[in-house]
Image: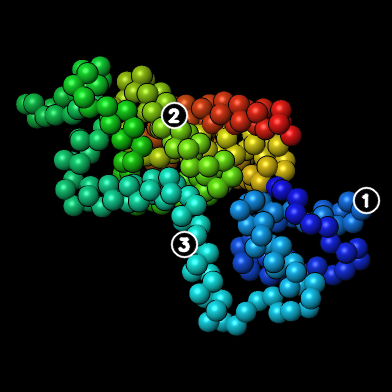
Amino acid sequence: MHPVIRLPSGVDTQELRKALWHYRIGHRITDEADGPLLWVADPRQHEELKALVGRWERGEPLILDRPATRKRTTGNMLALLRRVPVTVLSIAISLAIFALTEMFGDVIVMALTIVPVGIEGNQLVYGNLTQALTSGQVWRLLSPAFLHFGLMHLIFNLMWLWYFGRQIEALQGSRTMLLMLLIAGIGANLAQYVTGTVLFGGMSGVVYALLGHVWLMSRRVPHSGFFVPQMLVVFMLGWMVFTMTDLAGSVGFGNVANEAHLGGLLVGLVTGWYYSSRRLKTD
């Protein structure tokens, strides 16, 4: 969070706050000794927020009529998409690969698994990762993250990728988000591969990395703008532990990339600690 302007004491700010949320301006009002202080989550919305406060102080209408509102909402969404290109591109690639897999089947899957997969004598034959990399197939280190084996698997992962990824990209930049995607994706894939598993996929390792990163940033630097509900953290960690138990297998959740989840989470905790430590030194 970034401080913007002090508001008059004892004034009802309900209409102002309603307008700020209407225009999707993340904010917070804190009670300070010198009066209420208005904060903005995204510093790039600083001027937009100040202009809205100015209209509020002059008693002008804060929410425009319906046609203009729809146009503004569309513009805000397009502006948001432009601010988080890595997150949007990751989602688009995942959707495209899922569609191609539905159309062409195993051909796409075998091209994106962490090692080459073939069929000899009606049996699956797995290649070697070192040989695959030395032959130039370096994309296999990351490509399993974009594979999803079912619609619910896809929706669940992309929903959390959007929730956490846009926070990181909007607050720390596209370069940081891209770096996290690469490190977490490759790290989670390798963590799963070293356990002897070859046929796996999904963005969940990256999602758990983003979860760990956002959670540590929100805890260690409360005014950084990062936010994750505590119950969501409990749910996702509980789900990760649950899928590691025999009970998960007995109810149909046995084929889960548990090591990828854990590897991604560890990556996110490391990056979250590193970036939050840097932020604390500069504040």
| In front of the other: 232 or 71 | 71
Give the residue type that dot 1 points to.
Answer: Ala
Give the residue type that dot 3 points to.
Answer: Leu
Reply above or below: 14 against 27: below
Of labels 2 and 3, the one closer to you? 3
* Residue at screen point 20% across, 35% down: 110
* Residue at screen point 46% across, 56% down: 81
Q: Earlier in the sequence, mark 1 or mark 3?
A: 1
| In front of the other: 232 or 164 | 164
Residue marked by disc 2: 183
Residue marked by disc 1: 33
Reply above or below: 202 against 18: above
Q: Quadrant of residue 13?
A: bottom right
Q: Earlier in the sequence, mark 2 or mark 1?
A: 1
- The secondary element bearing badge 3 is classed as helix
| In front of the other: 135 or 75 | 75
* Residue at screen point 50% across, 67% down: 75
Rounded to the nearest whole Å, what is the CA distance between mark 2 and mark 3? Answer: 28 Å
Residue marked by disc 3: 78
* Residue at screen point 21% across, 24% down: 136
